[in-house]
Amino acid sequence: MSPFFQYFLSSLSVDVVIAGAGPSGLVCGYYLAKQGWKVNVLERQLRVGGGMPGGGMMFNRITIQQEAKPVFDELDINLQVYRDGLFVADSLETISTLCSKTIKAGARIFNLMSVEDVMIKNQQVAGVVINWSATVWSKLHVDPLSMGARVVVDATGHDAEVCRIVERKTGPCLRTPSGGVMGEKSMWAEEGEKALINNTIEVFPGLVVCGMAANAVMGSPRMGAIFGGMFLSGKKAAELIATLLKTGER
């Protein structure tokens, strides 16, 4: 236990905390850690990967578009040509390789750890409030701990949980048309993929949103079992965050 607690204690103040270890959160963590930033990825479930391991309807093959191929090539994930600029990958190889590469790049992944609140200081997100997932699921009254960060990433998927917490605590102050979480529209994979990259933004000072959470926050359609946009969104989020950190804006 001692090695874990030393590891954990040294992770309580970092550059970036990413809530959610699905594909977009892991890609974001990979690219940031690769640049030398101190990154924690928090996953409330026992396993990482979000919905990727199940593919579509538990068919564990996923489709990606041409634009995302360079990311897969960098990660050394095998692709098979499908048709018309589309490729197929094994979902389990994809997520296990991505997880391994993210850890080897230097990111720290904590599974079974939930984000139950955020810290906001001077009108800027300054970290998250964490607890063991088992404590949250059991609805036990156990005080949490805090984890400081210069930037927090909401990669929690459809529910956009971190953004909803910020909206609840600050009112309609998000950088969306309504000021709040707009809500995910019904499935339209092609349009959802197109919108996803534009929706990957700093939605509140110190809070960046990526992946499915980005479409949910901005009111865009959900996607199907096409996962390329998730990788591209995670990469864009990392580029945005690196700029914020380097310029001292966060």
Image: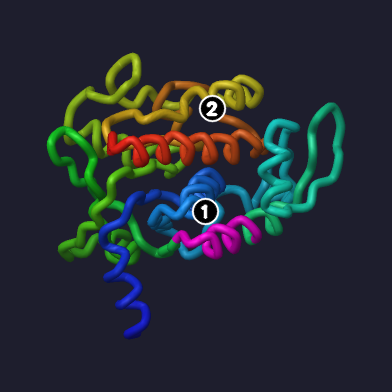
Q: Badge 1, how many Cα within 10 Å: few under 14, some, many 20+?
A: some
Snapshot quadrant of residue 179: top left
Q: How many marks?
A: 2
Q: Amino acid at mark 2?
A: Ile
Tag 1 or tag 2, which sits nearer the N-term?
1
Task: Give the residue displayed 52% in from the left and 40% down from the top.
Answer: 234
Q: Badge 2, how many Cα within 10 Å: few under 14, some, many 20+?
A: many
Task: Give the residue displayed 32% in from the left and 41% down from the top.
Answer: 162
> Can you identify the residue that label 2 sits on?
197
Q: Marks 2 and 1, how far apart in space?
A: 21 Å
Q: Which residues make up the magenta segment?
A: 97-107
Q: Position of residue 48 (x, y in %)?
A: 52, 58
101 to the left or right of 81: left
> Can you identify the residue that label 1 sits on?
34
Residue furthest left as drawn? 122
Q: Is residue 213 visible?
A: no
Q: Position of residue 238 (x, y in %)?
A: 47, 41
Q: Amino acid at mark 1?
A: Lys
